[in-house]
Image (tube, helix red, strand yellow):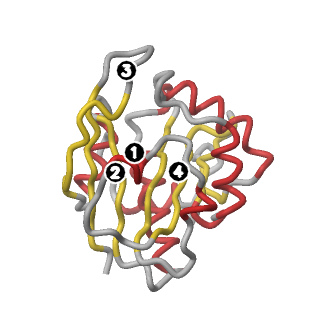
Amino acid sequence: MADVDEGERADLRGSVAREDTPRIRPAGMADLRAIMKLETLCFDGDTVEGEPAYRERIETFPEGFLVLESTEGIIGFISSEIWERRERVSADMFALGHSARERFAPGGNELYVSSLAVSPAHRGKAYGEALFGALLDAVTARYPGVRHAILLVGERWGGARAIYERAGFGTVAELKGFFGGRSVPPYDGYVMRRELR
């Protein structure tokens, strides 16, 4: 991803947006079709999660689901959940298509970033970094009990991993062959974590 200065980041978060600058806003059910289009565009067939999972994420934690919208429509999104922190991580925590409703803990202390996607045509413009920063800012402002963040990134997703590392996340576990295995060869996942407060 290209480096951006704080002024450009502010523009993307909607503070001083120009007409041609995409804006970040909360997702709604009307965005679901565009979100699913991006999901299939950005992830391999073994990793794509279905519409019911995304619908449930929006219903369960709307404050934790943001979209990046340009004049072309939705060009990026980020979704999350609030969990109770578990010291020991395991693959079952990150099962694709899991129920956000069943795992959601409104008084929990860890933000789980479940998905981040930016259209391939719009990568390299720091949009992923802007979405990620906007999510962390919004959740920590509204939920003071959230003190930690966790996510899972595929070894093939170098751009996303770079965003997380720049934001201070470090790898705490490797999940061998977590992704792929059907339509693409298996590849590893890396669990990354960071203290937020």
Q: Residue at x 32, y 36 (%)?
A: 154
How much space separates mark 1 and mark 4, taking CA atoms? 14 Å
Residue where numbered disc 3 is placed = 181
Labels 3 and 1: the sequence-earlier one: 1
The residue carrying pointer 3 sits among few (fewer than 14), some (14 to 19) or many (20 or more) residues within 10 Å by Cα, namely: few
Drawn side of residue 102 relative to residue 185, left or right? right
Question: Relative to the observer, which residue lies in front, 96 or 158?
Answer: 96
Write down the residue under mark 2: 4
Q: Position of residue 186 (x, y in %)?
A: 31, 23
C-alpha separation, residue under disc 2 versus residue under disc 1: 7 Å
Q: Secondary structure at mark 4?
A: strand
User: Residue placed at 59% from the left, 37% from the top?
Assistant: 75
Instruction: Report the amino acid beneath label 4.
Output: Ile
- In this figure, which residue is indicated by the disc labeled 1? 126
Disc 2/disc 4 C-alpha distance (Å): 19 Å
User: Disc 1 marks which amino acid?
Assistant: Ala
| Relative horizontal placement of residue 155, taking residue 25 as reference (left or right) | left
Name the residue that disc number 4 marks. 78
- Determine whether label 2 and label 1 are within 8 Å by CB: yes
Label 4 or label 3, whichever comes before in sequence order: 4
